[in-house]
Image (cartoon, rainbow, N blue to C red):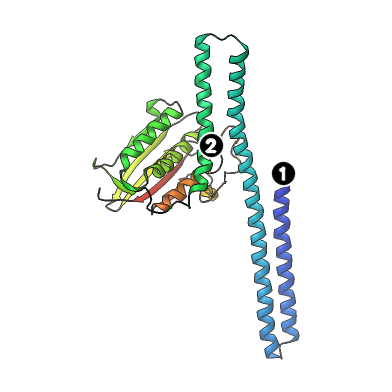
């Protein structure tokens, strides 16, 4: 109901803006026809009405952007609330069970493991929100050092494998063909966050069958490229640029099964740009998987 109401509001704002522009154009043309003999009035009238039309167009665009942003904020709050409440409720249930019932040691250890997983999920959500607020405020160059990028990527792969409880063969890593180390200059924590977010997205949107390929390439002496390809749900072509916006999640995805806050790829883009690189996504469409590519400046090491 809320989505339908917001769409009606957007449609109304657009329709109102179009009607006002059409009315202003009609008044402008009519006034020009009536005053075409008086040059000064004609000149001032054209400027005046042009300014009105431009103002109406800008105002309509601003209103539509604000409505869409409010909609994204609402979706973000709903997603974060769900991501926080679900593990808290789960932990509370396990604690109440341990408190009220006599549980054997094997069952107790199982509960402890599940609660630890829920706390990891809570921590991950909190870290994403904090990182999204932090990007853009961190001073450039602060905490940066020379990093062996291939080693960093392999560490992120092992972390993702452990976090998602994956078999070793489900994440395929391939380093540069030359086999030599590849170095970048940057903040290790930020780069780990960016790479981990890309890997988590690839795993999350792979569905039941996880098959992710990770390639580190060196197309030239100045660039290092990370490509992460999954065989999952894919991305519609018109959404490829929007997925890097703050709070944005592709409409139509089953959000009850695919959790998220809409901040992961936004953080990836912000951190990549802060390191002088760029990130983009490619996909053959829905159901055909997706590839996210990060390009970073390479250093001599």
**Is 87 placed left or right of 6 in the picture?**
left
Total count of labels: 2
Residue 104: x %, y % from top left? 53, 8
Mark 1 neighbour class, 10 Å CA radius: few under 14, some 14 to 19, many 20 or more: few
15 over 124 or under it: above or below: below
Query: Which residue corresponds to mark 2?
Result: 125
Mark before the other along the chain sequence, 2 or 1: 1
| Viewer-nearest residue: 138 or 285 | 138
Q: Nearer the viewer, mark 2 or mark 1?
A: 2
Query: Which residue corresponds to mark 1?
Result: 2
Numbered label attached to residue 144: none
| Viewer-nearest residue: 5 or 36 | 5
Q: Quadrant of the N terminus?
A: top right
**Is 20 placed left or right of 74 in the picture?**
right
Residue 214, quarter of the rendered image: top left
86 over 105 or under it: above or below: below
At a point 46% along the width and 40% down the height, the residue shown is 197
**Is 32 placed left or right of 239 in the picture?**
right
Residue 252: x %, y % from top left? 61, 41
| Viewer-nearest residue: 223 or 130 | 130
Report helix, strand or loop for mark 1: helix
Residue 219: x %, y % from top left? 30, 50
Distance from the alpha carbon under mark 2 to that under mark 1: 25 Å
Mark 2 and 1 residues: CB-CB less than 8 Å, in contact? no
At a point 52% along the width and 31% down the height, the residue shown is 121
| Viewer-nearest residue: 41 or 134 | 134
Report helix, strand or loop for mark 2: helix
213 over 119 or under it: above or below: below
Residue 194: x %, y % from top left? 43, 43
Inspect this view and state whether residue 106 appears. Answer: yes
Mark 2 neighbour class, 10 Å CA radius: few under 14, some 14 to 19, many 20 or more: some
């Amino acid at each position: 109901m809320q989505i339908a109401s917001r769409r009606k509001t957007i449609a109304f704002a657009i329709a109102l803006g179009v009607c006002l522009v059409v009315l202003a154009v009609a008044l402008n043309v009519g006034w020009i026809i009536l005053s075409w003999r008086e040059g000064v009035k004609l000149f001032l009238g054209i400027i005046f009405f042009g300014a009105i039309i431009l103002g109406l167009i800008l105002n309509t665009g601003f209103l539509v952007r604000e409505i869409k942003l409010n909609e994204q904020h609402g979706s973000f709050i709903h997603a974060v609330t769900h991501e926080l409440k679900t593990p808290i409720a789960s932990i509370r249930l396990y604690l109440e069970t341990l408190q009220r019932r006599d549980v054997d040691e094997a069952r107790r250890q199982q509960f402890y493991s599940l609660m630890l997983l829920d706390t990891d999920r809570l921590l991950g959500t909190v870290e994403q929100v904090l990182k999204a607020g932090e990007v853009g405020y961190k001073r450039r160059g602060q905490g940066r050092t020379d990093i062996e990028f291939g080693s960093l990527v392999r560490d992120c792969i092992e972390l993702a494998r452990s976090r998602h409880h994956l078999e070793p063969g489900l994440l395929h890593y391939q380093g540069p063909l030359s086999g030599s180390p590849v170095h970048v200059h940057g903040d290790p924590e930020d780069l780990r966050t960016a790479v981990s977010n890309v890997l988590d997205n690839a795993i999350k949107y792979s569905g039941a069958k996880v098959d992710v390929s990770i390639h580190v390439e060196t197309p030239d002496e100045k660039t290092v490229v990370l490509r992460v390809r999954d065989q999952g749900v894919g991305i519609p072509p018109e959404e490829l640029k929007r997925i890097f916006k703050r709070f944005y999640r592709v409409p139509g995805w089953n959000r009850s099964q695919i959790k998220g806050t809409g901040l992961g790829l936004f953080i990836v883009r912000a951190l990549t740009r802060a390191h002088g690189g760029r990130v983009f996504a490619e996909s053959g469409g829905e159901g055909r998987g997706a590839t996210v590519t990060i390009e970073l400046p390479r250093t001599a090491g």
